[in-house]
Amino acid sequence: MNAIKIKVLLLFLSLSLTSFAQETNSGDASKQKITISGTITDSKNNETLIGVNVSILELKTGVTTNEYGFYSITLPKGSYTLQINYLGFQTIEEKIELTQNIKKSFKLVSSEQQLKEVVITTNRKSTNIKTPEMSVNKLSMATIKKMPVVLGEVDVIKSLLLLPGVTSAGEGQSGFNVRGGGADQNLILLDEATIFNSSHVFGFFSVFNPDAIKDLKLYKGGIPSRYGGRASSVLDIYQKDGNSNSFHMNGGVGLISSRLLAEGPLVKDKGSFLVGGRTSYAHLFLKLTDNNNSASFYDLNAKLHYEVNPNNNLYISSYFGRDFFNISKEFQNTYGNATFNLRWNHLFSERHFSNLSAIFSDYYYGLTLTSVGFDWQSSIKNFNLKYDLKYYLNDKIKLNYGLNSIYYKFNPGTIKPIDENSSINFSQLDKKNAFEPAIYLEAEHQASPKLSFLYGLRYSMFYRLGASTVNLYKDGLAVTYNDQLKIYEKGVPIGTKEYGYNEVITSFSNLEPRFSSSYILNEKSSVKASYNRMVQYLQLVSNTASPTPLDIWTPSDEYIQPQIADQVAVGYFRNFNNDRYSLEVESFYKKIKNRIDYIDGADLIANNAIEQVILNGQLRAYGLELLLRKNSGKLNGWIAYTLSNSEQQTPGRTPNESGINNGNWYKTGFHKLHNLAVTANYSLSPKWTFGGNFILQSGQPVTFPNGQYEYQGIVIPSYGARNEDNLPLYHHLDLSATYIPKPNKTKGWQGEWVFSVYNIYNRKNAASISFRENQISGSNEAVKLSIFGAVPSVSYNFKF
């Protein structure tokens, strides 16, 4: 089977390259092709700009800059008008005469600055109706920083919840859900390195320092072939490179946390550095009271960039973060991420760009229970070598291709006694290793002035490796079914098998086709369609709706199959009223095979045979998304609405088995039928701007008891179908005001005050509802747990 897939991939590569070569060589041979290429940067700090539109007005064609600000476009000899535009910067036009290959870089000037060159207009954030890219959302850091947030801390992840198709499990919950998928099905990348837990303080904040972030893009569908390993979405975040012009610092002081970032040149106009950090200090105030509990976090960002020569650039970037949680010195919890990436950008020619990256990522979790007398440590580490290339064949076709290989080391848990008085013995859960290589090819193809495609193929492989001791079960069933009791039970091993270090235990391989298309109806509107297959080989062992630090990642094996996701989407996109407004409407359907489910009573913590409580099911999600944006004027913002359904099914493996929930479909823990988000910003004057967010979501599905019975004097609740109930409707309104005392000051110390109120009308949203017996009346009662009411905050931001 593997040989057949490899042949299919090689055939695809051969046919694609042949067709590209034919198209490249076709046409009038007398029209010699000329290439213009270069890099586009911010004039203030030489920061490369991602996604800048480079257009040839006469031919109505163009390209966008890649993740490193590089562009290349090939045209016949002649005179053209080159237009460069990017949100927040002045648009420039320049006449060019193409007689030979040339390199031409541009420095864009912020809209706030005066431009001495020729300027047409300030670019608006209108929808790009021409490209086949769909189901993709981009947010600028300038927009994110204007949003009111809880406790005054600007949050990248929370801002995503204002987009269509994106929800959370609730207040104080970590992670996010995309188009009805689980939070563990999102691939989160920071400078190409995987972030396994994106939250600080159990979901109250994200790990991303807004001052250090340059660009972020969320792919909900139509995912390019260079990405793999998750079933629902990709959040791709890039850190700033640092200012190579001059030294600058900026930061902020809030009620519970502060941040500081420094950047400057290593060698002027050739090299730069960036160092940033955040820390919280709410735990310091708790020490002034009788409260023995505390929660705090800190993180560090660093990056170095050096231009060896015009064709070679080196980057080193890293992140390190830790959370600390302490309850009366009895429960001590430490967890966090660490990443490192060494990158080399190389330009083979005006048309051929490459990026080679060596990446390390580590997620660590530690827990100490003093009362029990043990220390628990677990981690997942990966080592990733990836090579991505882009070849600009001509103005119609761009080819992306590359490969990557990831080696994983899993430590599900090391348990140690904390001292000689502990009754706990040392225990090491079975460590696991895995290897995930992949190769991909993708083409961006403008077939005609109205029709364009993005199509590709990814071939992924996965090897579960030793050293390991693997349980063997009768008939290969790690979970058995009790016909008399009609329940699932843990299988009893009939033996074990030993595998040596890096010996292959189980292997998988999959072809992952990707396809997107766009058809332009007129200058203001288009229709788009996409299909993509994603395969996820890592599984998060968790039976909660939202990931927690204690959740354990495990590789696919004989019993836990890889998740295979297929998604189709169609959409209508339109700009109107001179691009002041834009509308995006998308409908999607997603089906995921081998979504893991748990038998009733599953014990997940410190389980060295997790396969005994897991069954493979399936998930499906479908819905309609609308995004209406106002792109310009003193008042701007957007309205996002999603109508969707997300449900899971785990039928019996044989006709005699009942399956989970009697084999019926049931709502997932992240199903949200209705999801409405409204965000707005209003510029009253250069000194004052105001912002507001309103979020309304259907309540999270839960399972409430529907009765009770008494057994040997003990009252035991009984439950109906899984997730057939819902928490109450979730909604809140947040407002903010930003005051800049000296808005015209461009040098020296510049400051601003940000005042905000989260949940201004003090809505007590239910994080959960539990049931108990009233001690006075003896009757049963429901108790609602709410995390936040109204939360005012103030912070001071500065730069110099």
Image (spheres, rainbow, N blue to C red):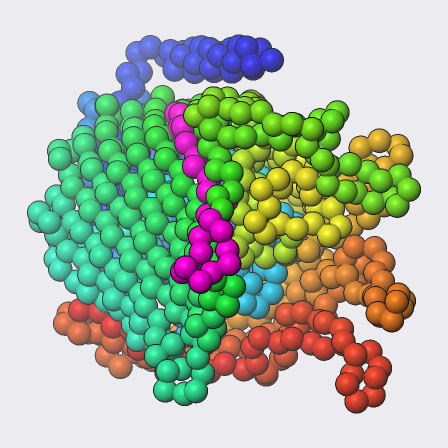
Where in the figure is residue 483, as x and y percent of width and height? 89, 39
Left or right relative to 202: residue 737? left
Residue 22 image position (x, y, % from top left): 43, 10
Q: Residue furthest front?
A: 421
Residue 641, quarter of picture: bottom right
User: What range of the chain is rendered magenta?
Assistant: 402-426
> What percent of the width, then of the height, locates residue 85?
33, 48
Q: Which residue is drawn at 36% across and 35% down?
A: 383
> Is 716 or 744 nearer to us in this picture?
716
Q: Can residue 791 be seen in this view?
A: yes
Image quarter of the C terminus: bottom left
Q: In this view, does 183 lie to the left or right of 755?
A: right
Prevailing secondary structure class for the magenta stretch in the rendered image: strand
- The answer to whether 679 appears left or right of 336 in the picture is right
Examine the structure image and report whether residue 11 is included in the region drawn in magenta: no
Q: Residue furthest left?
A: 267
* 231 lies above or below 126: above
Identified at 58% across, 42% down, the residue is 608
Residue 798's place in the image compared with 338, above or below, is below
Q: Nearer the viewer, residue 314 or 220?
A: 314
Q: In this view, does 202 lie above or below 349?
A: below
Residue 404 image point, x, y percent: 40, 28
Q: Which residue is drawn at 47% across and 60% down?
A: 422
